[in-house]
Structures are given as C-alpha cells and as structure tokens.
Image (cartoon, helix red, strand yellow):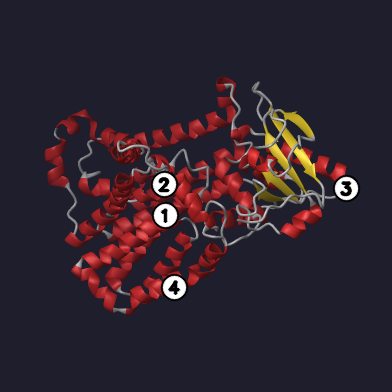
C-alpha cells in the first residue's frame, strides 16, 4: 500500500470513529456544542463569547439534519480530516517524501488535541484547518506568487477571524515573517499581500461593525478568560504552566517515537539521528521553525510580561506542525528499528482515547456517582418546561432566561426552540428585541435547590420565588442524584428590562 493510500485509510477511519462513537453513545452534547446551538439559533454576526462561525456551522447541521444534535461531532471530524490533509500537503511542499508525510500526519493525530477533545466542537477545533491552511497558502504564495493564493489566504484569514480572534497571532506571525526576511520582503512590492489584506478586511467589515455596535462584547469575554496575575510569581509560573501543558499534550507523539526506536536504537539515537536527518533547503527549514515556534514564543512572552494565565486549550491550533517537525528533526521514520511497533502504538493510543469516550458515555456514571453534563436530561427538561409554559399562558414558549447550561438546553430541545435570553441581560444577549420579549413573556430557569435564581436575575424581580421545581432522572441507568430544575413564569407585560449600559 502506498503511503498516500495508507494515510487516507488511517485518517479516514480515525475521523469516522471519533464522529460515530459520540453520535451513538452521548445522550447530550458537550457544553460548548449546546452553547453553540443556542447562539446559532439567532444567526447573529457575533455572540457573547466568540465570533459567529462555530455557531453558524452548528446551526447549519441542525437544519440539514432536521433538528439533529450530532452535527458537532461530524464537524470536529471534518476539521481533523481537513487538518490532516493540509499537514500532508504542507509536508510535501516542505520537501518531505510521501512516507515521511504519512508519519507526520500519524504523529500529529496522536497529540492530545486531536483525540479526547474532538467531540466538543468549538472555535479551538475549528481553527485547526484554518491555521494549517493559512500556512500552506502563505508558503505557496511566497513560492509561486499567484494572486489566487493571496486571495484564498485573505479569505481564509477572514474565516479564521470569524472563528476566533486567536488567529490574529498567526496573521501577525505571517506579517512578521514577511518583514524580517529579505527574500520575503520583496513580495511587499507586489500586489499579492495587499489584495490579501483587502480581501480579509472587506470580509470582516460586517463583524467589525457588529463589534462596534455591541461595545466590543466578545473582546470583553476574551479579556475575562485570561486570568490576571495575582503576584510577581505568576509572571514565571503561568508561562511555565502553559508550556508544560503543551509538552504534556504531546505525550502520545513521544510514545509513538519511542515505540519505533526500541531500546536498542534508543541507546544510539543521537548518532543515528545525525546520519539520517532529512536535508531540507534552508528556506524550508526556516519556514518550518518560524511557524512552529514563533506563535508559542509570543504567547509565552505575553504571559511572562503580563503574568496572565492563558487557557491551555488555546494551544490547539498552534501545534499542527508538530508531526512535520518530528519527522524533520528526529529523522523519523529513517532511524526507527520498529516502524510496525510505532504504527501499533499510534493505533493503540487512538483506541485508548476512543475507549475513554465510550467509558464516559456508558461507564463513568456508575463508578463516579456524580452528575455529568454528558448525561443531563436536557430533552425531558425542555419538553416539560415548554408544556408548563403553554399550560399556564396558552402560548408557545418564546424566551428562556438563565445561566448558560440551564437556558441553552431549553433553547436546543424545546419545541419551537425559544430564544436564549442569557442571564436576563440585554448587553449579553444583543439579539433580544425588548418589545417582543415584553409582548411574549419569558421563563426564568435555574438548577439546584435554591428558591430564587442567581442574584443578577433576582435583583430584577425583588421578592419573587420559584413558581415550581421538579426533579429529573439523568440519562443513564446509574443511580445518580436527580437534576433539580426550578422556574419562574414571567407573563407578557410583566418582564423587567433594565436599560443596556
């Protein structure tokens, strides 16, 4: 079997299984997916936490599948498959052989970000093909200078900005590369980069206008997710923690490399590596090292400078070159004494993570004895609350207010898909029409045994207590504590709407 055909079979099967297992066994989608469906129902140019692309794509799958909620798993699988294809293409462009490109893809696939987090389709996962594609297009544009590549690069950069602003790090890395190296600076005097910038800017204008209109809502969220330094020690500890997490996320890659080496080869690894290392052209080496390490260096420097703690999962798209880097500088697979063992190790790692997903769905509730979002009875709760609303008001439920998990599940599963009035806050829910919600009323929903909702909602209705409370069994045979759901029915004309600040 040729390396290209082997890569298709391996990647295709891995992606298929990571889509099928959660589709067939997960009772409720993960948090980010439920949240994305709730945002996507509104079809806005942006949302409280992120730009709109993830939510748009989830909404597209919802409509194409007639209300199915499994689309996120397949979107993640598509992102991984596109990422593998682009890694292959980039490896070949950088001078690696088909066999080396195959192993670059396999080694990429066993890094943590391409395994257990896959079912939770979110902007981090959606960035994977964006980063790999932008690197490929930029390399091609540098080499061939075709205007079509620059246009595609600008369009993909815009797509990335509609996905997550973190892609600005890659855009900056591309721009800096262009300015630092003399052979790349020559393109500044051609039309390509300027057309690229114009295409990107033109496509992002609608979102920028939305940002201005909403007082840069998503930027406020991004700032809140980066924890500020609590002491001088954080300026050293936080970047080290981030780097340590990224190294740990490559544990699968290290294990496959070690399996291929074996103890005998491992003892003479350094000398054999020097003899077998792939010789790439200096420009290809420079390109690979620049895009593999500059984004990481910027994040570490920013964390050290500010003392801020960056979310570890933000590193998801930053390491699409890890497999290529390993093949290039560790002389894989040339120095391997046991390539079949390496392949077996890669398959075993994928099987282990797929087994973990199965375990989360089928076994975890039995031994953990703890409520899990994965088994949350969202469908039953949504149907019951919609029925209660209709019984008391005679109308269909149009708006539901509450925390993200409580409200988003009702939005996703209730008949007619009521709009989520996130935290009963107009600033956090700019899609809400104040007059319409006043005309139709809303239901406030929260979980737990409290008689009143959280303080920000209780302040809007002083003295109000829950109109009702019910318990729901989790979607598992395990004997878990039931989910307690509370509600307040706010009829039309009685909705309190504080002004947007």
Task: Give the mark toward the camera: 1 or 4.
Answer: 1
Q: CA distance from mark 2 to mark 1?
A: 8 Å
Classify mark 3: helix, strand or loop: loop
Q: Are marks 2 and 1 in contact (CB under 8 Å)?
A: yes
Where the C terminus falls, by quadrant?
A: bottom right
Near-viewer residue (73 or 489): 489
Residue at image location 68% in from the left, 49% down from the top = 420
Q: Is residue 96 visible?
A: no
Q: CA distance from mark 1 to mark 4?
A: 19 Å
**Label 2 sits on residue:** 314
Task: Give the mark toward the camera: 3 or 4.
Answer: 3
Dot 1 crowding, Cα within 10 Å, few <14, some 14–19, many 20+ = some
Classify mark 2: helix, strand or loop: helix
Dot 3 crowding, Cα within 10 Å, few <14, some 14–19, many 20+ = few
Q: Is residue 73 left or right of residue 244?
A: right
Q: Is residue 215 left or right of residue 312?
A: right
**Label 3 sits on residue:** 394
Near-viewer residue (390 or 499): 499
**Circle on res. 166:** 1
Residue at image location 47% in from the left, 50% down from the top = 222
Looking at the image, tell me whether mark 1 or mark 3 is earlier in sequence order.
1
Q: Is residue 231 left or right of residue 40?
A: left
**Label 4 sits on residue:** 199
Q: CA distance from mark 4 to mark 2?
A: 26 Å
Q: CA distance from mark 3 to mark 4?
A: 50 Å
Q: Are marks 1 and 3 in contact (CB under 8 Å)?
A: no
Q: Are marks 1 and 4 in contact (CB under 8 Å)?
A: no
Q: CA distance from mark 2 to mark 3?
A: 46 Å
Looking at the image, tell me whether mark 4 or mark 2 is earlier in sequence order.
4
Looking at the image, tell me whether mark 2 or mark 1 is earlier in sequence order.
1
Dot 2 crowding, Cα within 10 Å, few <14, some 14–19, many 20+ = some
């Amino acid at each position: 079997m040729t390396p290209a055909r082997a890569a298709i079979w391996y990647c295709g099967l891995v992606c298929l299984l990571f889509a099928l297992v959660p589709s067939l066994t997960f009772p409720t989608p993960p948090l980010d997916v439920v949240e994305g469906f709730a945002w996507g129902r509104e079809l806005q140019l942006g949302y409280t936490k992120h730009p709109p692309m993830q939510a748009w794509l989830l909404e597209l799958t919802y409509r194409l599948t007639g209300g199915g909620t499994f689309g996120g798993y397949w979107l993640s699988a598509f992102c991984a498959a596109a990422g593998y294809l682009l890694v292959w293409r980039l490896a070949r462009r950088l001078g690696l052989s088909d066999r080396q490109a195959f192993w670059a893809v396999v080694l990429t696939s066993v890094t943590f970000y391409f395994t257990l987090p896959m079912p939770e389709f979110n902007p981090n996962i959606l960035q994977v093909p964006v980063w790999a594609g932008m690197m490929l297009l930029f390399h091609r544009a540098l080499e061939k200078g075709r205007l079509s590549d620059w246009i595609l690069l600008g369009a993909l950069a815009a797509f990335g900005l509609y996905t997550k602003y973190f892609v600005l790090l890659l855009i900056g890395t591309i721009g800096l590369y262009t300015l630092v190296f003399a052979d790349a600076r020559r393109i500044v005097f051609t039309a390509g980069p300027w057309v690229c910038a114009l295409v990107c800017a033109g496509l992002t204008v609608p979102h920028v206008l939305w940002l201005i209109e909403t007082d840069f809502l998503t930027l406020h969220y991004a700032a809140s997710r980066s924890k500020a330094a609590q002491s001088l020690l954080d300026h050293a500890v936080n970047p080290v923690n981030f780097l340590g997490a990224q190294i740990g996320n490559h544990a699968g890659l290290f294990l496959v490399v070690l399996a291929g080496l074996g103890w005998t080869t491992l003892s003479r690894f350094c000398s054999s590596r020097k003899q077998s290392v792939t010789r790439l052209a200096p420009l290809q080496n420079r390109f690979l090292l620049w895009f593999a390490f500059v984004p990481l260096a910027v994040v570490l420097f920013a964390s050290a400078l500010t003392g801020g703690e960056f979310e570890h999962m933000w590193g998801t798209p930053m390491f699409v070159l890890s497999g290529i880097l390993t093949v290039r500088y560790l002389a894989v697979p040339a120095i391997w004494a046991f390539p079949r063992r390496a392949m077996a190790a890669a398959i075993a790692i994928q099987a282990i993570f797929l087994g973990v997903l199965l375990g989360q769905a089928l076994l975890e509730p039995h031994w953990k004895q703890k409520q899990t979002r994965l088994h949350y009875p969202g469908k039953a709760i949504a149907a019951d609350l919609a029925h209660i609303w209709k019984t008391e008001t005679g109308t269909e439920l149009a708006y539901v207010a509450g925390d993200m998990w409580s409200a988003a599940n009702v939005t996703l599963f209730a008949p007619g898909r009521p709009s989520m009035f996130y935290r009963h806050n107009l600033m956090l829910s700019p899609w809400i029409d104040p007059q319409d919600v006043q005309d139709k009323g809303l239901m406030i929903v929260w979980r737990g045994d409290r008689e009143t909702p959280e303080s920000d909602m209780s302040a809007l209705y002083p003295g109000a207590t829950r109109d009702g409370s019910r318990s729901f069994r989790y979607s598992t045979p395990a004997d878990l504590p039931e989910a307690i759901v509370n509600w307040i029915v706010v009829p039309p004309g009685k909705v309190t709407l504080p002004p947007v600040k």
